[in-house]
Image (cartoon, rainbow, N blue to C red):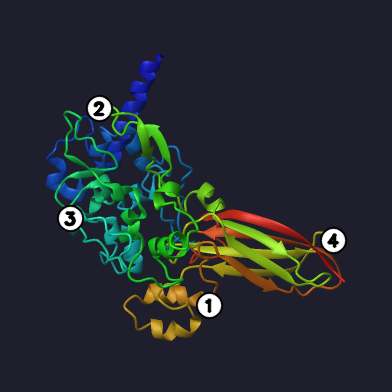
Amino acid sequence: MSKKSFLFIVFMAILAAAATLNGADTQEKPKASDTKTMGTATSSAECGACHVAIYREYAMGFGGDLNYKGIVYQSAKDKLLTLPANVSTGGTAHSLAGLDPFPIHARDIEESGRSCNVCHYPQSFEIPDVENLETAKPKPRPPEQEAGGMTCSSCHLTPDGKIRGPYNVADVADLPHETVPEPKLQTAAMCAYCHSLGARVVGKQTQTFLEWREDFNKPGLGHQQCQDCHMPRTLRKTAEDFDVPVRAVARHLWTGGHSPQRLSSALGLVLVQPNKDKADVELHVINIGAGHSVPTGSNRRGIYLMVDVEDAKGKKVSSREWMFAPWYGPRPDDKAFLEEDKKRPDALSATQADAQGPHETTVRAGEDRILNWTPDVKKGNYTVKARLIYDLNRYNERTFTADQTEINKADLQLAVK
């Protein structure tokens, strides 16, 4: 088979997958009227006809290490919540955000069917100023347009119907839509509306943008924007069939909690025996690789620090476990509120969180969280083995481990006299 024939087959396969994912025919290039008619509900497959490589990353996670496995939402004994059979398990979080059962099935269980997930179905919006003290939810699309989920237009369509991008392409002929350059598109402000809701509350869920701004950017821990880590750049054309130059273009992957590579770079783990010949152990969990708290986002996310002490024969003689997780609300999760939770409109979600409290809160950007432990052991030589386990849903039964990823581990030789 010739190289030209092979590339043609690959290209047609991409278009077929795009049509399957979004129910659209991508054989024709989109018309300028498409986004004006459908707004942010415009199928991403329409954009994929011209922006082939970008669409392939968005829809299939092409070039990333994303993997969406079955998720437990009520009980591990029930059927797992999985993606439709025709959707790649390597798709990005944005491409899957509006697909049944993500998040429609989840909100049926947790929110009595209310259309609360407006970040998955936003109308076009202006990118806010990075210094806004608070960020509000974007305005949602009408229910009949929810099926499109998070589309390319959700981020790139301006309120006046133009397409915003990182570069000026006004001199390119035959563009199917008007394109305007928008510098803010390459800044963390682009992510603010959906990745931080309300005012800054340290430890609370859905605070990612504010965690980046207050804990990472302002103190000078780094100058990276969200896109620098979650959308690494590559050199290519933004649209393959148009006369545009090869430039640095962001990969539309948004690697995060479903990316083992991203998770493994977030936290460092160090064990120390601070007092010679004593059984005391210091466990340092250090946020060295994330520009925000870890774990961040949904309060479902959790990290377990699991520690075992083995004797010289390899027999386990002592164990301890900690859990790091965002709070559900503006206060620490606590079992003391379980009775009060029953009276809340969000009783199920609040009860789930408080039933697991109190626990360690999230590890902030640049923080060295020190946990002290003195295992009950006799004199002798031991090995302390610690592991950090990332859990996509900490409300699962603990026997369900398919959605967990080991992100770091460390050992310590402990001599007790």
Residue drawn at the location 57% of the way across and 62% of the way down:
399
Instruction: Measure the C-alpha gap from mark 2 to mark 3.
Output: 34 Å
- Pointer 1 residue: 358
| Sequence-earlier tag: 4 or 2 | 2
Residue 114, picture quadrant: bottom left
Residue 249 vertical position relative to residue 324 in the rendered view, above or below: above
Instruction: Measure the C-alpha gap from mark 4 to mark 2.
Output: 67 Å
- Classed neighbour count for the residue bearing mark 1: other residues with Cα under 10 Å, few (<14), some (14–19), many (≥20): some
| Sequence-earlier tag: 2 or 3 | 3
The kind of secondary structure element at disc 4 is: loop
- Classed neighbour count for the residue bearing mark 4: other residues with Cα under 10 Å, few (<14), some (14–19), many (≥20): few
The kind of secondary structure element at disc 1 is: loop
Residue 416 vertical position relative to residue 270 in the rendered view, above or below: below
| Sequence-earlier tag: 4 or 3 | 3
The kind of secondary structure element at disc 3 is: helix
- Pointer 3 residue: 144
Task: Tell me where residue 375 appears, x and y as whole percent.
Answer: 74, 73
- Pointer 4 residue: 312
Question: Where does the C terminus fall, quadrant-wise?
Answer: bottom right
